[in-house]
Amino acid sequence: MKILPIIEDNINQRFIDEVVDTLRDGGIVIYPTDTIYAIGCDALNNQAIERICAMKSMKSAKTNLSIICHDISDAAQYAKFDNNQFKVMKRNLPGPFTFLFPALSKLPKAFKGRRTVGIRIPDNVIARTIVENLGRPILSTSVAGPDEDYRSEPELIAETYANQVDIVVDAGRGNVLPSTVVDCTEGDYEIVRQGLGELIY
């Protein structure tokens, strides 16, 4: 496992390239978001997704999977949403929200049985730069740890996941609150988890 220091206001493109190459090769990385650090892989690589699902015991089809997209146009390739939902997303993204929508068939086999996909466009330049350079979304699931430090300090996160991931991106201490999860699958906006973001309707 390798730790790569990348900061938002001075992004090292060589390190970004290394992260992207690792993702393209089916690797798993831990990276910053605008909330908790996340574990991710190429969201179109079924084998890599299955590795993360096994790592976090997300084998049930009832467990939603979330992806980070570069922008809303990118998200429209993978999730079904209407014009009103588009407007709500535009008011709140980039930001600390996960919007749950019906998943489209472009997503890989790991999503089958999971008819819903979580869409994240975080207010974090590093995460969005990785996605933009990869050219497709990355899976997003929060790191786990026994306390706030183990969920927010890159060195402690790296210690926890040393034998499970290929790269940890060190962007400094992360947030300790998760994203706000908004279920849009029934056409309305149901807050199923209140996190960092306050939704603007």
Image: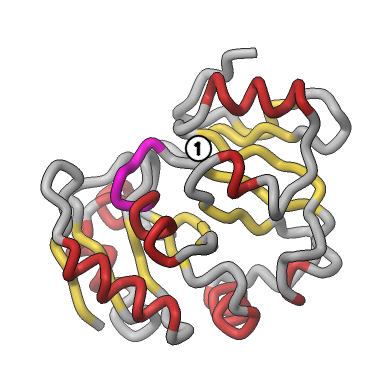
* Residue 105 x %, y %: 81, 63
Left or right: residue 9 versus residue 119 is left
* Residue 191 x %, y %: 68, 27
Q: How is the image coloured?
A: secondary structure
Q: Residue at x 19, y 63 (%)?
A: 13
Question: Which portion, as a residue range, is magenta?
Answer: 123-127
Left or right: residue 95 versus residue 31 is right
Q: Residue at x 35, y 65 (%)?
A: 30
The residue closer to the viewer here, 176 or 141, is 141
On the rendered image, what quadrant is the C terminus found in?
top right
Q: Is disc 1 placed on a helix, strand or loop?
A: loop
Q: Amino acid at mark 1?
A: Ser
Q: Residue at x 44, y 40 (%)?
A: 122
Q: Residue at x 85, y 28 (%)?
A: 187
Q: Is residue 34 above or below residue 46?
A: above
Q: Is residue 126 magenta?
A: yes
To which quarter of the image does residue 132 belong?
bottom left
Residue bearing the label numbered 1: 179
Q: Is residue 173 above or below residue 155?
A: above
The residue closer to the viewer here, 109 or 145, is 109
Tell me if I can see residue 94 in this picture: yes
Q: Is residue 138 magenta?
A: no
Left or right: residue 161 versus residue 169 is right
* Residue 150 x %, y %: 29, 57
Q: How many marks?
A: 1
